[in-house]
Amino acid sequence: MLGAMSYAFEAEGLVKRFGTTTALAGIDLAARRGTVLGVLGPNGAGKTTAVRILATLLRPDSGRATVGGHDVVRDAGQVRRLIGLTGQYASVDEDLTGTQNLVLIGRLLDLSRRDARARAAELLAWFDLTEAAGRPAKTYSGGMRRRLDLAASLVGRPDVIYLDEPTTGLDPAKREEMWGVVRSLVDDGSTVLLTTQYLDEADALADEISVIDHGRVIAHGTPGELKRIAGSQTIVVRPTDPERIGEVADILRAGAGAEPELPRPGLLTVPVENDAVFTAVVRRLDDAGIGVVELALRLPSLDEVFFTLTGHGAEEPTEVAA
Amino acid sequence: MTTTTRAAATPPRTGAPRAGARPFGLARHSLALAGRSLIKTLRTPEQLLDVTLQPVVFVVIFVYLLGGAISGSQHAYLEFLLPAIMVQTVLFASIATGVSLNTDVEKGVFDRFRSLPIARSAPLVGSVVGDLVRFVVCIAVLFAFGYAIGFRIGTDPLSTLAACLLTIAFAFAVSWIGVLLGVLMRSPGAVQGTAFLLLFPLTFGTNMMVPTDTLPGWLQWWVGVNPVADVMEAARGLIIGGPVAGPVTRSLLWTVAIIAVFAPLAVRAYRRRA
């Protein structure tokens, strides 16, 4: 049994309305210290509203939230000492250089001029931005800009870091890089709240995932638990030589114990219960000398998870917007 | 660089400098943020175009286009006009504070500030203080141009300096109205439009261009209650000579009153803005 203080942040029954739309309809979120909570949901599900309340930028209409035991409304000042915010909204100043942005935040956090400079240099080096440190942020590429945004939220060495869709719009290589950064923050003892629209991102980073839709938590669990709810993983194979598709089908049938499907010509898919089957299939394809142009173990998509949980897809228009 | 080396290079979290409460937070944080405004102004010199060109354009239009007709002597008119033009152009320059503030709020720069443990008013105070440099540039350009075309002060440098400081103080107060608009309105363009709409009757509805006794009765009444007319009268008295005690006192009272009303309103609106 965990005591209340082992949670880095905790939200209970948060409700937030904007005019006649209900962005949050009573959600609970919590993360234990040193873990990553993934908040997964489509656009307009209420992810950003929840982050903004936990970051003291918005007051909930009802419900309560605490960070490090401090109430986000009554002890907002204390909460702001503990948090770092990176997101679609909290942004760096494009006219200032990387160094100027970080030094400014250091000064606002009451570091001495020297300490602020040292901390800025340290973070810029850590995020591979030393060479760009003297250039205005508006000259940065998308990936550099995200890294500077993240560096800005780390100046005060926050205990709790909110990352609001940190990889939306980044190419796959930059995404992987951002994932590496998130992992090292957690290794370093920080607690992270990560909102995302991507199941694979939540799966790669989160210790626990809360799936939200229409301002409510509709499922909560470890990535493994959610995947079990949402259905199995799928092996996808496209052999180089379409003539050998029959042999591939035999291998898949033997390995997975299920009948492969042919969703498109030349492409076979089969649901599997555990990862080990994939390794076995790869080995047999190799033994048989079958070359492949596509070979993957796919998680169910967010859409499939949503369909299982809600009966509607993630991309369907929702009647509630945030 | 790989993430492994990154993680190894992570600065230790403990034992390093960490945010802590120190006294005079509001003043220190506001100054740090004023420094930010200043850097932005210096980095984008086109932001100074309005304050450098506007005084020149206004002087040229009024003195050479209208001066002969209004006063018969362009030089005499320049003496009469320049102190008032100073007040007008500095007030126009104060609009930019509200406009750039609105841009910052929309872009999310202020959300980062709002998530930091600093006073909610610090970003607003910082913006207003940082833009004071624009007023100084505006006044410097105006006097330089005025001197080039024959303007001379009729009093002494100290009185003239007092006139400049009074004008800057009044514009600082008016900036808070711009800040309130900047926080409340949806787009920088709307802020600019509304601010100009407010400033036109305030700056032109004065004795800036012509003596008050040439105006129709209703307009004389307006000039009588218009605080900008007081500031122009005070600046004129301090720079070229004339009564100063009354206009200066009224200008200072207006300055304090406008700050006392609009600064808290702006901070409150900013605090409430979602």
Image: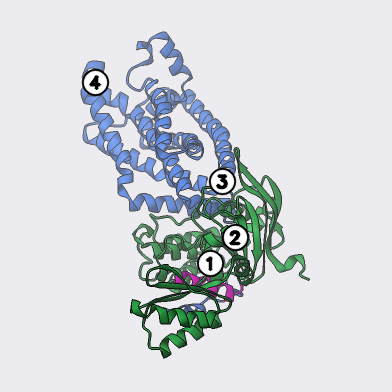
Chain colours: A green, B blue
Q: Position of residue A76 (x, y in %)?
A: 65, 53
Could you say whether the residue bearing mark 2 is in a helix, strand or loop?
A: helix
Q: How would you rate the neighbour count of disc 2 (Cα within 10 Å): few for under 14, some for 14-19, many for 20 or more?
A: some
Residue tagged by mark 4? Answer: B66
The residue mark sitting in front, 3 or 1, is 1
Q: Are marks 4 and 2 on the same chain?
A: no
Is B150 on the left or on the right of A48, as rendered? left
Q: Nearer the viewer's eye, disc 4 or disc 2?
A: 2
The picture quadrant where one finds residue B152 is top left
Q: Residues within 10 Å of mark 4 (few under 14, many from 20)?
A: some
- Is B263 rendered above or below residue A82? above
Cα–Cα gap, marks 3 and 1: 48 Å
Q: Are marks 3 and 4 on the same chain?
A: yes
The residues colored magenta run A176-191
Q: Which residue is farthest top?
A: B217
Distance between mark 1 and mark 4 Cα atoms: 77 Å
Residues at marks 1 and 2 on the same chain: yes
Q: Which residue is mark 3?
A: B121
Q: What mark, if any, has residue A308 been given in the picture?
A: 2
Q: Mark 3 vs mark 4: which is more N-terminal?
A: 4
> Is B3 included in the stretch rendered in magenta?
no
Q: Is residue B235 left or right of residue A278?
A: left
Q: Is residue A99 visible?
A: yes
Provide the chain ID for the residue under circle 3. Answer: B
**Res B223 → quadrant:** top left
Assign a secondary structure to mark 1.
loop
Q: Amino acid at mark 4?
A: Leu
Identify the residue position indicated by label 1 in the image: A300
Spatial CA distance of label 3 from label 4 is: 44 Å
B154 or B25, nearer to the observer: B25
Q: Which amino acid, by three-letter code, is at mark 1?
A: Pro
